[in-house]
Image (cartoon, rainbow, N blue to C red):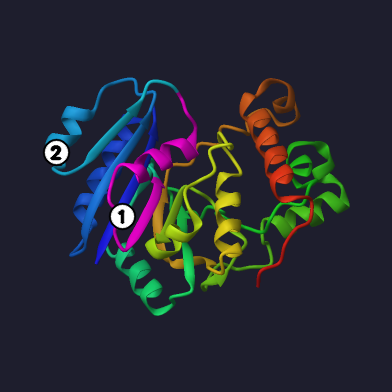
Amino acid sequence: MKITFVITSYQAPELLRLCLKSLQENIGDFEYNVAVADGEPKENLKQELESLYPGIVYLATEKNVGYPALVNLGLKNVPWGDYIMAMNGDMIIPAGQLGKMVSYLEQHRDIGVLGPQLLYFSKKPQNSCFRFYHPLTIVYRRTFLGKTSWGKKDLKRFSMEDYDRLSPRNVDWIMGSAMFLRQSALEQVGLMDERFFMYFEDVDWCRRFWEKGFRVLFFPDAQLFHYHGKLSKKRGLLDIFFNKYVWIHIISGLKYFLKWGWRTPRYY
């Protein structure tokens, strides 16, 4: 059994080092290979990482090309194992968690994407599984309209507040920070859509897996630690005017709905 890791990083070398160290220490008996796709790095890590981790493929881009392009860069430059973990470089993999995910996927062959429970380093759970956006969901998330009764109702739906996250469950999509993929499913679905610079690429990818007949599952039995910086949420309402990541989010949302239409699908 072989796992391919595609690890993306953007100007966070210390977190990347910790991520790779945790992987090396906790890979267990699995065969594996690693591609690191580093966006606009502040320091050249190629020699250091290749000496510490023989067989690693280190790929750097001169510019910030966006998350989907980094994932695809990694996928294009390493042979795929039976499973692929596409993940951010700000993730720590504890012992035994990879085995749990592989074991579950081996028993459930119709799952194409599995998302582990992500934790802050305080062990507080992060919300990483969601229902699909309605056209107004992004407006409710970014403006005072989210405080209205209909806004609150839609945000509760979107965030799956009716799900206790104590047992595995089909979900519309999982956050792209950590996506455990079945290789045979990925071959049918294809790479990430690079029209999305950042945000909605994970929504789009999960929807494409559903469209091909593969389930997307949230799997809380496996847990990873994630340093999660919320770039797109800093100043509340003023974000709409001053935070470029909010605008990237909105533009990606428009691209998503132009691609898929305005209707929200139900796959399960």
Position of 207 with respect to 66 (left or right) is right
Q: What residue type is labelled 1?
A: Trp
Reply yes or no: does residue 178 show up in magenta.
Answer: no
Which x, y percent locates residue 122? Answer: 43, 49
- Provide the residue designation for mark 2: 52
- Relative depth, front residue between 213 and 16: 213
Write down the quadrant of residue 140 in the picture.
top right
* Mark before the other along the chain sequence, 2 or 1: 2
Seen in the picture, residue 265 relative to 177 is either above or below; the reply is below
Question: Which quadrant of the figure contains the C terminus?
Answer: bottom right
Write down the quadrant of residue 31 in the picture.
bottom left
Label 2 and label 1: CA atoms lie apart by 22 Å
Write down the quadrant of residue 156 in the picture.
bottom right
Reply yes or no: does residue 68 show up in magenta.
Answer: yes
Seen in the picture, residue 209 relative to 78 is either above or below; the reply is below
Q: Which amino acid does label 2 sit on?
A: Leu
